[in-house]
Amino acid sequence: MNDQIKDMVIIGGGPAGLSAGIYASRARLDAILLEKGTYGGQVLLTSHIENYPGFPDAVGGFDLADLMHRQAEKFGLKIEFLGVESITPEKGHLTLGTSEGSIRTKTAVIATGSIPNKLHVPGEEQFTGRGVSYCATCDGALYKGQKVAVVGGGDAAVEEALFLTRFAEHVEIVHWMDHLQATPILQEEALANEKISIRWNTMVSEIKGDEALKELILKNAETGETSSFSTDGLFIYIGITPQVEFAKGVVEMDERGSIVTDAKMATSVPGLFAAGDVRSWSIRQVASAVGDGATAAWYAYNYLQGIK
Ligand SMILES: Cc1cc2nc3c(=O)[nH]c(=O)nc-3n(C[C@H](O)[C@H](O)[C@H](O)COP(=O)(O)OP(=O)(O)OC[C@H]3O[C@@H](n4cnc5c(N)ncnc54)[C@H](O)[C@@H]3O)c2cc1C
């Protein structure tokens, strides 16, 4: 790895990281973005986004990721496909550990987002990729004319259930509560959609099949009664967990494992900032992620200039 100390390393290439990258490269910093997978982050898991300003007719998840990436590269942002494995505060800089050696930097922005939560029930691992999915955009089209179930009651679950009605003959939402938590406009759309029905107060307790998923064992959350539900696909949207393993014990986190920041996106470690879904109190939206990314890069720049 290059021995020179960088001005800024952005960790993660989702909306927050790409937004920070746009600001860092326009400020002509010696900056680099490290991404462990594919740029775009969770935006790649959704078919379309209706609430991101500037796109009155909605924008596709892949399209938005591509536009953000092109904009960042246009201003000269360097991107390397490398995961950060550790972060060590040193005197006057931070050292980031990767599989290809370490990188020293004066500032860093953690924008590593989150990953989908699992149900942790028997059969989930066995049938992942064989009926069980966490991404309707990726796998929805496989269920043309078939029957699918969606677990969850928040925005992501209801949005993706609506998306799945384009392909599936029927979509069953399975939710452990007696009401949805999704934004009212999404609830209205789901309740009015003939292809969707909702199974209230119900949890998935087991996933069964042979070569592929065939059946869910459902449990009534109130009575404990179990029943069988046959389905071709199961899409799981029950929240997300911040990706912060590499920063544990280094930076202050809240009880949910999200990184604590102030209004400037500064963390408890000097020179270390956090942005997007990974930070405490994030509303976990693209609009808030890009705002956080811009704020983090802005105040990291001020930090480099010695401005408090
Ligand atoms: C199904 C679904 C539907 C959604 N629908 C909407 C919607 O309609 N509207 C809306 O506003 N929001 C929506 N969201 C939420 C939105 O996608 C997120 O809020 C947003 O992507 C968060 O951006 P981020 O950059 O903070 O994190 P992420 O998008 O999670 O990106 C983080 C990136 O960091 C990378 N990374 C992680 N760890 C490391 C590491 N150690 N080293 C290097 N790279 C790393 C990851 O690979 C990833 O690319 C949806 C999310 C899902 C899952």
Image: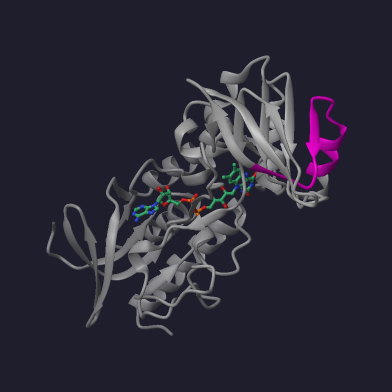
**Which stretch appears magenta?**
186-204
Q: Nearer the viewer, residue 202 or 188?
A: 202
Residue 162 on image: x %, y %: 73, 32
Q: Is residue 160 visible?
A: no
Residue 188 on image: x %, y %: 85, 41
Residue 71 on image: x %, y %: 44, 44
Q: Relative to residue 198, is residue 250 depicted above or below?
A: below
Q: Is residue 146 left or right of residue 116?
A: right
Q: Is residue 18 visible?
A: yes
Q: Nearer the viewer, residue 258 or 170?
A: 170
Q: Nearer the viewer, residue 259 or 290?
A: 259
Of the 4 image quadrants, the one containing the C terminus is: bottom left
In the rendered structure, does residue 133 fall within the stretch colored magenta?
no
Q: Is residue 76 left or right of residue 252?
A: left
Image color mode = one colour
Q: Is residue 14 left or right of residue 121?
A: left
Q: Residue at x 29, y 45 (%)?
A: 81
Q: Relative to residue 241, is residue 299 depicted above or below?
A: below
Name the image quarter holding residue 93.
bottom left
Q: Is residue 90 left or right of residue 288?
A: left
